[in-house]
Image: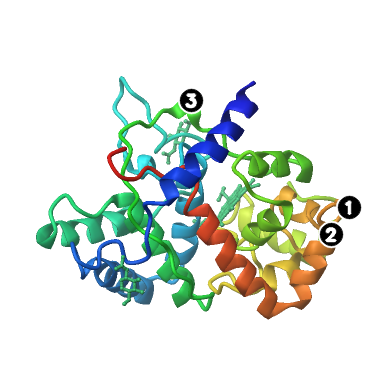
Amino acid sequence: MKMITIFLGFVFLLPLGLGNLKVGFYNSTCPRAESIVHQVVQSRFQADRSITTALLCMHFHECFVRGCDASILIDSTDSNPLKKPAAPNLTVRGFEIIDEAKKIIEASCPSMVSCADIITLATRYAVFLAGGPSYDVATGRRDGIISARDEVNLPGPTFSVSQAQRAFAAKGFTLTEMVTLLGTGAPDRSMDPSLIMKLKVTCGASSSSDPTVSLDQSTPSIVDNKFYSEILAKRGILQIDQELTVDKSSMAIVAKFGLDANGIRQSFANAMVKMSNVGVLTGNAG
Ligand code: HEM
Ligand SMILES: *[C@@H]1O[C@H](CO)[C@@H](O)[C@H](O)[C@H]1NC(C)=O
Ligand SMILES: CC(=O)N[C@H]1CO[C@H](CO)[C@@H](O)[C@@H]1O
């Protein structure tokens, strides 16, 4: 029943809402909005190239729960625990990038530019800075005012491919789009043994250094197709990532992206635009 409600909501409400989104929505009301976001992202990126993964992860968590309505930014209170600190939220970081851009924009265009648009624009530009495709995103999203921890129902790292596929289908994504989007980012028996050794050192209790591990062992700060060649070499980190290479439904898609560095760019741009349009509020909503 719940699935049906979500599906109908998507089919009937989303196209109506999207009609109000436009590329360059702020051209006349706040012409510098996009360039301010770009400047903030650029200066942060120069200091820390990992902001691209931070923003991609934030954008996913933002859009998959209640839609792209900036509810991920709403702070929790003790009496009202919100989605910001809900699991699996542990890696969502980079909120200060959105806050900084919003503060600068507010100074010249008070109460005009939504945080939902700032998240989408910042993510889009960070993907481009990290060598990914450059794509247009429409703007005009409104911010929601509701955020609830019990609505956070993101796919988990131990999901099977078909479980993950159902979660993405509920938001209108095809399997190929899901595999495209996953390419950004206790060891399995099939894992490359040299990687297992490396992870044991990095993650071991005796390790004194930073225990952070990249999900792409080859080019973690670049948006490219290396994730697929890594998982094909049994060097995936998350169970779901490695499963993509063995599940009959997804193995051919992975093989194609592993070989086709250009094909993945256009597919990724299209899937990101689709992600940025999930459940948006426009016009007088929000
Ligand atoms: C089946 C769906 C997904 C699952 C199960 C999943 C799971 C995870 C997990 C477990 C982590 C690591 C958390 C940690 O450090 O403990 C992670 C990180 C990350 N995820 Fe996902 N994810 C999914 C989909 C996506 C999508 C669609 C995107 C974006 C297009 C994305 C972008 C990222 C990024 C960029 C990171 C690294 C975060 C950072 O560097 O701070 N994920 N994900
Ligand atoms: C805003 O300007 C850009 C670039 O000139 C243009 O492509 C876009 O269509 C404009 N959008 C609106 C809503 O005026
Ligand atoms: C960093 C952070 O906010 N962690 C929280 C993620 O969600 C879990 C469960 O809801 C909290 O216990 C953590 O504090």
Task: Look at the picture and state if 229 lies above or below 238.
Answer: below
Judging by the rendered image, the residue that carries numbered circle 2 is 251
The image quadrant that residue 25 belongs to is bottom left
Q: Quadrant of the N terminus?
A: top right
Using the numbered discs, state the Cα–Cα distance from disc 2 to disc 3 in whole angstroms: 33 Å
Query: Few, some or many C-alpha atoms within 10 Å of disc 2 (few <14, some 14-19, many ≥20)?
Result: some
Using the numbered discs, state the Cα–Cα distance from disc 1 to disc 2 in whole angstroms: 6 Å
SS type, badge 1: loop
Using the numbered discs, state the Cα–Cα distance from disc 1 to disc 3 in whole angstroms: 33 Å
Task: Look at the picture and state if 77 lies above or below 157.
Answer: above
Horizontal and vertical percent position of residue 8: 58, 32
Which residue is depicted at the point 64% across and 57% down? 182
Q: Nearer the viewer, residue 226 or 181?
A: 181
Q: Nearer the viewer, residue 151 or 97?
A: 151
The image quadrant that residue 69 belongs to is top left
**Is any atom of residue 92 visible in this view?**
yes
Judging by the rendered image, the residue that carries numbered circle 3 is 150
Residue type at numbered disc 2:
Met
Of the image marks 2 and 3, the number of the one nearer the N terminus: 3
Residue type at numbered disc 1:
Lys
Task: Look at the picture and state if 95 lies above or below 28.
Answer: above
